[in-house]
Image (cartoon, rainbow, N blue to C red):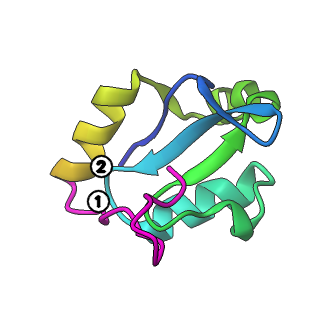
Amino acid sequence: MTVYIDPPTWPGHGRMWSHLVSDTSYEELHAFAAAIGAPRRAFDGDHYDLPSERYASAVAAGAVQVGSKELLRHLTAAGLRRPKRRSPQGEAGRT
C-alpha cells in the first residue's frame, strides 16, 4: 500500500500542481488526502490535484516521490486509472 506523488510541474490557475495517487484503493487515497488536509474537491476522478505548497507535507506524511510517467504506471497497474472526462466540445478534462 503506497501513495505516490509527482513533482509540481502541472500549471493551472496561476499555480503549479502535483498529482497524488494510490496503488491500492481510492479509500486509501481519500484517507491519506484527508490526513494531509487536502479537500475532497481536489479529487479528480482517480487522483488528487495538490498545489505545490502541499508537496512537502505530502512527502513528509509518506507519499513516495516519482516522475509523472511512473505515477501513471502505478495507477494503471492498480486498475484505478479512469479515462479522462471529455467536454461536449471534445476537449479533455483537467488532469
| In front of the other: 63 or 77 | 77
Q: Residue furthest bottom?
A: 88
Category of crowding for the residue at label 1, using alpha-carbon neighbours closer than 10 angstroms: few (below 14), some (14–19), many (at least 20): some
Q: Which residue is mark 1?
A: 81
In the image, residue 14 lies at what x, y percent?
Answer: 83, 34
To which quarter of the image does residue 78 belong?
bottom left
Badge 2 amino acid = Leu
Q: Is residue 50 above or below residue 68?
A: below
Q: Is residue 63 above or below residue 32?
A: above
In the image, residue 33 lies at what x, y percent?
Answer: 66, 55
Residue range of the region highlighted in magenta in the rendering: 78-95
Badge 1 amino acid = Arg
84 sits left or right of 14 in the view: left
Contact between marks 1 and 2 (CB within 8 A): the answer is yes
17 sits left or right of 88 in the view: right
- Predominant secondary structure, magenta span: loop
Per the image, label 1 sits on a secondary structure element best described as loop
Residue plotted at (81% across, 54% down)? 37
93 sits left or right of 75 in the view: right
Distance between the alpha carbons at the discs numbered 1 and 2 = 6 Å
Per the image, label 2 sits on a secondary structure element best described as helix
Q: Is residue 51 above or below residue 1?
A: above
Q: Is residue 50 above or below residue 57?
A: below
Asked if residue 79 is among those painted magenta in the image, a careful observer would answer yes
In the image, residue 19 lies at what x, y percent?
Answer: 54, 41
| In front of the other: 84 or 49 | 84
Residue plotted at (54% across, 55% down)? 94
Labelled disc at residue 75: 2
| In front of the other: 84 or 74 | 84
In the image, residue 48 lies at what x, y percent?
Answer: 58, 54
2 sits left or right of 83 in the view: right
Asked if residue 88 is among those painted magenta in the image, a careful observer would answer yes
